[in-house]
Image: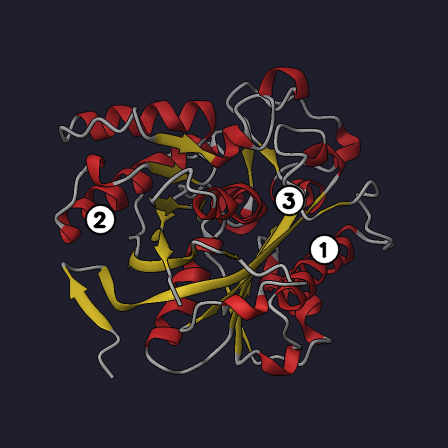
Amino acid sequence: MNSGTLLGKASISFSRPVYIQSCASVVGPKEGDGPLKNCFDMICDDPMFGEKKWEAAESAMQKEAAVLAIGKAGLTPDDIRFVFAGDLLAQTIASSFGIAEMGIPFFGLYGACSTMGESLSLGAIAVSAGYGHHILCATSSHFATAEKEFRFPLGYGCQRPLSATWTVTGSAACILSPEAPHPSEIVGSSLLRSTLGSVAITGITTGKVIDFGFRDSLNMGGCMAPAACDTIYRHFEDFGRSVNDYDAVLTGDLGVVGRQILLDLLKEKNIDLSSVHQDCGLLIYDNQKQDTHSGGSGCGCAASVLSSYILPGLLAGKWKRILFVPTGALLSKVSFNEGDTIPGIAHAVVIEKYEITS
């Protein structure tokens, strides 16, 4: 099977589109008060999600997103060949505990806040190669679990600098398939399909680990911006494309600080991205009204914005082709406490609206 063409050193152009059949997003109360409040599938007013521990709450949230995505595609867990999922917690326990009861073969991923890009990339490769007819891609993050894991206990009341981002309490899931949703399935369903077409992944560029020597865990945007720059630049080189070939380039969670660094770094490479660039961390919150400083972050940031805003926007004709570039800071509490630097990574996914007549 000719599943795609290798481009450059890190890109794949798929010979056939990998369709996103459905998507779902679940968020917490702060996200539900933000600019995208009318876009999410579920807003839970209880940040504990009915559980007694923060980690269990995140697991419950990710499971709910997965169940919603599967149901919206008219499927059951038995129809899913593989799940590619991950989160920010040690040994990705939010994903493994959340998915465990569903009985789906599981690949646990860690790409920090770039995990949704990693998940979609691997899922698209598996679908394109013929190794699964339905693949579930999911991720999550939770403000309380991330603060507990990487920064300070909430009860400590630590002051946050303006460069700090706010970890999104949110989860999202997508179902990938080699087939577009059939028109007859539209009635009474919530498939990612309109009468005019569907949405598909057509290419990917896998990111490299980039270390610029940053050590500030309260400036994640600065840590991740060089990786985003490298991936976007190599994507344009590998595909022979430019800024003009995309209606939008959406990074994951660079925030105010990281976005400016990214734009400056790309200008040094003679690329002006300012006209098409948006950042999911700046879309999910109203920084001024919600006091989120530099913006949103976390695995759930890019993922929930993708599922609630970007994919429906493509389907509605807001964009024709976008480049989705989730960004991640690859630190652990061990590496940080031992004084190591914080490398970054970013994975690019080309997502397009496909017109379908049959």
- The picture places residue 94, in percent across and down from the top left corner, at 66, 60
In the picture, the quarter occupied by the N terminus is bottom left
- Residue named by callout 3: 146
Label located before the other in sequence (2 or 3):
3
- The disc, 1 or 2, on the residue closer to the chain's N-terminal end is 1
- Label 3: which secondary element: helix
Q: Is residue 99 above or below residue 347?
A: below
Is label 2 in a helix, a strand or a loop?
helix
Q: Position of residue 20 (x, y in %)?
A: 47, 62
Residue at 66% x, 70% y is: 99
Residue located beneath label 1 in the image = 61
Residues 164 and 16: in front is 16
- Of the residues shown, which amino acid type is indicated by label 2? His
Give the side of residue 216 with respect to residue 125, left or right.
right
Between disc 2 and disc 3, the foreground one is 2
CA gap, disc 3 and disc 1: 15 Å
**Residue at 23% of width from left, 59% of height from top?**
11
* Residue 271 left/right relative to 165: left
Confirm whether residue 137 shows in the render. yes
Could you tell me the amino acid type at mark 1? Met
Quarter assignment of residue 46: top right
